Amino acid sequence: MTESAPPNRRLPLAGLRVVEFTHMVMGPTCGMVLADLGAEVIKVEPIQGDRTRHLLGSGAGFFPMFNRGKKSIAIDLHRPEGAAVARRLALSADVVAENFKPGTMRKYGLDYASLSAQDPRIIYVSCKGFLPGPYEHRTALDEVVQMMGGLAYMTGRPGDPLRAGTSVNDIMGGMFGAIGALGALIQRGITGRGQEVQSALFENNVFLVGQHMLQYAITGEPAAPMPDRISAWAVYDVFTVKDGEQIFLCAVSDAQWAVFCDLLGFDDLKADPRYHDNNARVRLRAELLPILRERLATRSADELATAFERAGLPYAPIRKPEELYDDPHLRATGGLADVTLTDGERTGQTAQTTLLPITLDGQRLGAGAQPPRMGQDTTDLLNGLGYSATEIEALCADRAVA
């Protein structure tokens, strides 16, 4: 069983300061990863607060999910006094992260060129829609790059492109930004100099579909959308079974096929020379799958799951996200952690969030500090930057900070 990290455990990035000028999902994910690894991550919010604090529907979980473990300071970058505070804060950091449109940070003297001129050791992570090139000034969203990058085509039915069911590019783009920051930190330890790191939604999406691009390059055959694909394995599908339940069943090797047939009493299929190996079964998949669907239709999902578990064959129940709160593996291994909600009707209540899917020294990392209230650390951070009580009072009175 995976243990939970003790509260006094020293995490690998302890002592590292990250200042993030981020919003929505991609940039905050970068900061969340670094925070979970132990960095002090300071979220710079507008005076009105990060707008994801108040999103409805599919955005309701954005702020508590991607901003846990951080401090919050609210700064009005449009005011010269506010921009000056932001620059001083950024220059106190090891890593600065941002995910605004190209050119935005330059207006406030918060771009890499401006900051690195004063501190050559600074590492600067830009999370963008596109890496520098012909598309870099386009406005990008996860769904935009899924459509133009082949992922929606691969996920949907032919002629019906469908975005993936979660923010895959936003989240992974932020993760790649964090990976780049970690690499830059190691290099800084060798050379003494920082650098700029860039990650991008579109290039992340292209990386995700790279296997399908190579499929075409190698075989000359375009990759078909998932529902219409030529599978690499004959038994690798969702089956509708007794009482309309569904279960995903697999047999991806010849050895697993033999176990599959023995387990379910399909001796005739095992003995049929037409199905002698996986590639043969793949070629005859159109006739094999209807046979399997008919035979499995009388078995219950629980019966099949129990049998496949015992035999060591891969299988999966079809779960909804909300059902994962009761998943015995997640609960037993510390895969969920409580967070206190900071905004909306449920302010002050707790909910459970997911953790980074890694262990260090056999332990999950935990969720760190609770998601911050807007501007909760403003005064402490300004004190740490050397502002006097009178200066802080004046900045707050002028709404340069909050």
Image: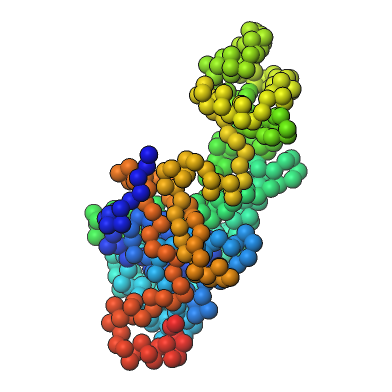
**Residue 267 in view:** yes
- Rendering quarter of residue 235: top right
Please state which of residues 262 and 285 is positioned toward the viewer in this rendering.
262
Query: Which quadrant of the figure contains the C terminus?
Result: bottom left
Q: Is residue 98 left or right of residue 223?
A: left
Q: Is residue 389 left or right of residue 237?
A: left
> Does residue 331 sit above or below 42 in this rendering?
above
Q: Position of residue 125 (x, y in %)?
A: 41, 61
Please state which of residues 63 and 207 is positioned toward the viewer in this rendering.
63
- Rendering quarter of residue 231: top right
Q: Residue at x 67, y 9 (%)?
A: 268
Q: Position of residue 277 (x, y in %)?
A: 59, 14
Q: Position of residue 186 (x, y in %)?
A: 29, 53
> Does residue 102 sit above or below 230 in this rendering?
below
Q: Residue at x 47, y 64 (%)?
A: 340
**Residue 229 in view:** no
Q: Is residue 50 left or right of residue 304?
A: left
Please state which of residues 193 and 161 is positioned toward the viewer in this rendering.
161
Q: Position of residue 261 (x, y in %)?
A: 61, 15
> Does residue 29 sit above or below 160 in this rendering?
below
